[in-house]
Image (cartoon, grey):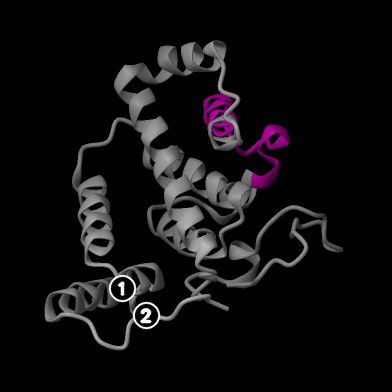
């Protein structure tokens, strides 16, 4: 259950911005609704996310979605897993490849480059970070410097989203089904991976 509720009264401009997300996704996005308590946080987040969506990308959409999903899984943010999975599936990523992310190193469904990017996401998300020069040089050689910068920004951005939502107790809104948005980790009876205390979408 969320630790904070959206404000009961907000300015007309913030209400209009939330209405746009409601039209896009069928419901108001709870992180934005809660952020409406603070005008600076609300608008900074909205503008930043809009620019990220609109800017040209150097990385393939599938790689961006896999890395984003990995960070959300590592941090354990049910909301980000749920919403991010919905966006990834809309963009064409298969359920099978998405669900391979928790055990990516052993998966035949992911490419060597994808595995290196996911390992980089793990190293950058660790506290303290464990990124080494060899990881950076390998990714720079495959993605170029602009691609490496985009990858690093994406990992840092998803850390921000996941930790914000985790801190405020925001859970899955039901954008995807329980099998896709469950928090992975421990092996379940059917061979799927679900962490203790995980929540379905």
Q: Which residues are magenta?
A: 102-120
Q: Position of residue 39 (x, y in %)?
A: 22, 66
Q: Is residue 5 left or right of residue 197?
A: left
Residue in the foreground of this view, choosing between 124 and 88: 124
Q: Give residue 87's quadrant in the image.
A: bottom left
Residue in the foreground of this view, choosing between 17 and 191: 17
User: Disc 1, disc 2: CB below 8 Å?
Assistant: yes
Dot 2 alpha-carbon crowd within 10 angstroms: few under 14, some 14 to 19, many 20 or more: some
Residue 37: which numbered mark, if any? 1
Q: Nearer the viewer, mark 1 or mark 2?
A: 1
Among the two numbered marks 1 and 2 on one chain, the one whose residue lies closer to the N terminus: 2
Residue matched to label 2: 6
What's the residue at 58%, 25% (across, down)?
A: 112
Disc 1 is placed on an element classified as: loop
What's the residue at 49%, 54% (across, down)?
A: 162
Magenta stretch, main secondary structure, is helix
Give the CA separation, mark 1 to mark 2: 7 Å
Residue in the foreground of this view, choosing between 48 and 84: 48
In reply to whether residue 71 is colored magenta, the answer given is no
Q: Is residue 161 left or right of residue 56?
A: right
């Amino acid at each position: 259950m969320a630790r904070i509720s959206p404000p009961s009264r907000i300015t007309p401009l913030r209400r209009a911005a939330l209405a746009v997300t409601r039209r896009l996704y069928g419901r108001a996005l709870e992180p934005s609704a809660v952020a409406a308590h603070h005008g600076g946080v609300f608008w900074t987040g909205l503008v930043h996310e809009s620019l990220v969506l609109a800017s040209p990308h150097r990385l393939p959409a599938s790689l961006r979605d896999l890395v984003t999903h990995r960070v959300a899984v590592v941090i354990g943010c049910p909301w980000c897993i749920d919403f991010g999975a919905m966006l990834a599936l809309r963009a064409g990523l298969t359920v099978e490849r998405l669900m391979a992310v928790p055990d990516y190193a052993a998966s035949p469904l992911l490419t060597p480059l994808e595995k290196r990017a996911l390992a980089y996401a793990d190293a950058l998300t660790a506290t303290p970070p464990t990124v080494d020069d060899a990881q950076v040089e390998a990714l720079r050689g495959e993605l170029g410097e602009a691609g490496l910068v985009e990858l690093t920004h994406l990992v840092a951005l998803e850390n921000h989203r996941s930790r914000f939502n985790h801190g405020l107790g925001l859970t899955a809104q039901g954008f995807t089904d329980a099998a896709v948005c469950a928090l992975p980790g421990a092996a379940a009876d059917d061979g799927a991976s679900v962490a203790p205390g995980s929540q379905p979408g």
